[in-house]
Image (cartoon, rainbow, N blue to C red):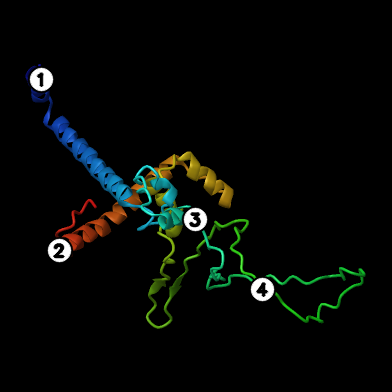
């Protein structure tokens, strides 16, 4: 049955013109390239976990094996401990984020006891606390004005280089494209979700075609790095399979 189907397909191909055969080859190569990119994407996603990426440990529940039964009473008590610091353990909470983007000064306008107005210059103590906040519009629209200037010495015209955070001819900045690529390839979100996110963060509308092109561009961009990493593993640690 399969042999007859192959013969019929061969007969159909023999009836095609040279141009039609060339078109089939081009389409086949395009499809093969798409499948190769998809394989790379899935391989990267499968190899990522909470130890080598920002993937939360909760996504690895299906991969975790059952914990061995405690062999002693002390081990059993250790497994029953609640997460976090234990009673009597000194605190070691991280303070701050190693940077400050904006300072907000909070001054009392009236006395909490008698209601009188307070002179804001009479500060006797200041408490500080750093908080990571989500600003109103994390995405800003930047209009670049690239100037072309004429040299007073030779008369030639020179143009300023484009900003390194953008790509000429593309509407989305490099960092925003990276975020969308992460959401599409790693987080596997459907296209409507990034569209909603872009609207909430910056009130901008982006078509599905733009998201598809962005994901493909990001995938092509990481292929050389993945290949380089695989080569390094094979050369330095030949006993470790690459797919691990």
Q: Nearer the viewer, mark 3 or mark 1?
A: 3
Residue that label 2 marks: 235
The answer to whether mark 2 and mark 1 are in CB contact below 8 A is: no
Q: Which mark is residue 128?
A: 4
Task: State the residue at coordinates (91%, 68%).
Answer: 115
Q: Earlier in the sequence, mark 4 or mark 2?
A: 4
Q: Nearer the viewer, mark 4 or mark 3?
A: 3
Q: Earlier in the sequence, mark 1 or mark 4?
A: 1
Question: In the displayed structure, does residue 4 sit left or right of residue 184?
Answer: left
Task: State the residue at coordinates (34%, 45%).
Answer: 65
Residues under labels 4 and 2: Cα distance? 51 Å
- Residue 125 placement: quadrant: bottom right
Quadrant assignment for the N terminus: top left
Q: Earlier in the sequence, mark 4 or mark 3?
A: 3
Residues under labels 1 and 4: Cα distance? 76 Å
SS under mark 2: helix
The answer to whether mark 4 and mark 2 are in CB contact below 8 A is: no
Residue that label 1 marks: 2
Q: Earlier in the sequence, mark 2 or mark 1?
A: 1
Q: Which mark is residue 148?
A: none
Mark 4 is surrounded, within 10 Å at the Cα level, by few (under 14), some (14 to 19) or many (20 or more) other residues, namely few
Question: In the displayed structure, does residue 12 sit left or right of residue 152?
Answer: left
Question: In the displayed structure, does residue 138 sit left or right of residue 121?
Answer: left
SS under mark 1: helix
Q: Nearer the viewer, mark 2 or mark 1?
A: 2
């Amino acid at each position: 049955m399969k042999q007859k189907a192959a013969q019929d397909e061969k007969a159909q191909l023999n009836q095609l013109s040279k141009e039609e055969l060339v078109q089939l080859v081009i389409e086949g190569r395009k499809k093969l390239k798409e499948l190769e990119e998809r394989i790379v994407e899935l391989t990267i996603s499968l190899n990522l976990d909470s130890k080598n990426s920002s993937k939360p440990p909760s996504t690895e529940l299906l991969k975790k094996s059952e914990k061995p039964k405690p062999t002693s009473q002390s081990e059993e008590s250790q497994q029953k401990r609640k997460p976090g610091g234990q009673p009597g353990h000194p605190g070691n909470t991280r303070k701050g984020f190693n940077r400050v983007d904006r300072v907000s000064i909070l001054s009392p306008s009236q006395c909490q006891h008698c209601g009188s107005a307070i002179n804001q210059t009479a500060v006797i103590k200041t408490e500080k606390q750093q908080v990571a906040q989500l600003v109103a519009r994390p995405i800003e629209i930047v209009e670049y004005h690239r100037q072309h200037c004429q040299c007073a010495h030779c008369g030639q015209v020179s143009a300023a280089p484009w900003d390194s955070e953008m790509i000429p001819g593309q509407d989305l900045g490099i960092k925003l494209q990276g975020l969308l690529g992460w959401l599409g390839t790693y987080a596997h979100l459907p296209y409507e979700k990034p569209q909603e996110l872009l609207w909430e963060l910056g009130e901008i509308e982006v078509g599905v075609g733009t998201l598809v092109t962005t994901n493909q561009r990001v995938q092509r961009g990481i292929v050389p790095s993945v290949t380089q990493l695989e080569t390094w593993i094979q050369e330095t640690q030949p006993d470790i399979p690459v797919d691990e």
